[in-house]
Image (cartoon, coloured by chain):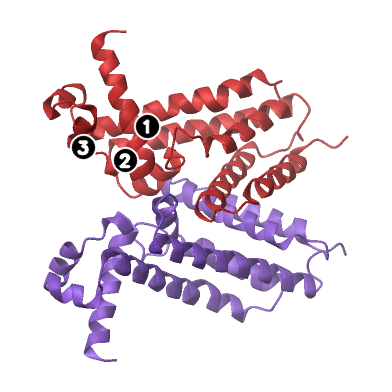
Chain colours: A red, B purple
């Protein structure tokens, strides 16, 4: 890794932590430069604009999600076991200590839903890919005979995502100690309703 | 209404609109004073601090939610019809044109989940009341014989809230035209699973 790449990675790492706490809009090139002991112009040499930096933070978040959620899921057997593992890792992701302010995608969604521009486009593209990949995991479970042949896999992906968001809300805002048990029960019900009759 | 009350209401109205777009943290007393043609000290006479103003915005949001969601629900027959009406109005609320930036509670939750203080406490108190009230509406449906006697009403409230959050995400961030149909199908499934066997 070249020195330039290393510096770039250090900047994105720091920006990622700041963004989980203060949001993407809370990223300030001046403040980051201060925290990293760099000059503002030095930082600008790596990222031409705040929007570029926001996109790099979202890209780093997608890579971490890939490692944290997808990689272990892909080790599970194809079909229902893989889908279940995927959802379990996704629930854990929401509380990942490297995101002290909570899931960066949830924070970014609330910030960017009404702000057109490149960061929004990037986030939407990544989230659509995620929904499609969850639906595809469900489709493989249909092919394996674990789930009903007439299952609406996009509907299942919609409901799985809703449960992750509900868990995030009850766990992080309400700090409800029952949130995890409730989320698990709901996921069990969702998967049971998708299962093929014996 | 006294002149002071009127001014106070004008300030909160404007602050409410700003907060749906820029978040509670985006409220600036200086900017609001400019927009309303008031002096900063005049505005400070009504709200001692930014935290006070944030709490008043959340209080106004709760009153609007009450009018928009609960009032029509309470006109429906007690039991499943009332719970269904409540959830339907809640889905509509998320797209209410008076909140150009989307549901203020969703935005506030993402902002405040990791920021201790009075605004967070106020929001958490209101949201716990909401979850308890949804669970109570489900309990009335059990009493009416519409729902199973062994229904876990808090679990139903958890899942209903999750579906509203999922709908909000798919509708507002992904702008998915199928979001509403998906949310309705999920709600139908949730209510069907709660229903008493004939």
Q: CA distance from mark 3 to mark 2?
A: 13 Å
**What is the quadrant of the C terminus of chain B in the image?**
bottom right
User: Element at badge 1?
Assistant: helix
First in sequence, mark 3 or 2: give its number: 2
Q: Which residue is mark 1?
A: A58
Camera-side residue of A134 and A94: A94
Q: Quadrant of residue B98?
A: bottom left
Q: CA distance from mark 2 to mark 1?
A: 9 Å
For discs 3 and 2, the disc positioned in front in the rendered view: 3
Residue B76 percent coordinates (x, y): 64, 78
Tell me: residue B118, above or below residue B79: above
Q: Label 2: chain? A: A
> Which numbered marker is on residue A31?
3
Disc 3 to disc 1: CB gap under 8 Å:
no
Left or right: residue A61 compared with residue A54:
right
Q: Which residue is mark 2?
A: A24
User: Element at badge 2?
Assistant: helix
Camera-side residue of A43 and B102: A43
Tell me: residue A169, above or below residue A80: below
Q: Label 1: chain? A: A
């Amino acid at each position: 890794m070249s020195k330039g790449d290393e510096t770039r990675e250090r900047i994105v790492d720091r920006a990622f932590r700041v963004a989980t706490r203060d949001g993407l809009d809370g990223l300030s090139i001046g403040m980051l430069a201060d925290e990293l002991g760099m000059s503002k112009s030095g930082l600008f040499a790596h990222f031409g604009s705040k929007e570029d930096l926001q996109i790099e933070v979202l890209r780093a978040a997608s890579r971490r999600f890939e490692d944290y959620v997808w990689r272990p899921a892909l080790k599970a057997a194809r079909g229902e076991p893989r889908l279940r593992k995927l959802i379990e890792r996704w629930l854990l992701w929401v509380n990942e200590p490297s995101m002290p302010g909570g899931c960066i995608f949830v924070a970014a969604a609330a910030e960017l839903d009404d702000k057109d521009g490149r960061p929004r486009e990037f986030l939407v593209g990544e989230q659509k890919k995620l929904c499609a990949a969850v639906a595809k995991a469900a489709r493989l479970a249909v092919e394996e005979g674990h789930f009903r042949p007439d299952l609406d896999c996009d509907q299942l992906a919609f409901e799985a995502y809703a449960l992750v968001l509900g868990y995030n809300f009850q766990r992080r805002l309400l700090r409800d100690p029952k949130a995890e048990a409730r989320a698990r029960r709901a996921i069990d019900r969702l998967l049971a309703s998708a299962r093929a009759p014996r």
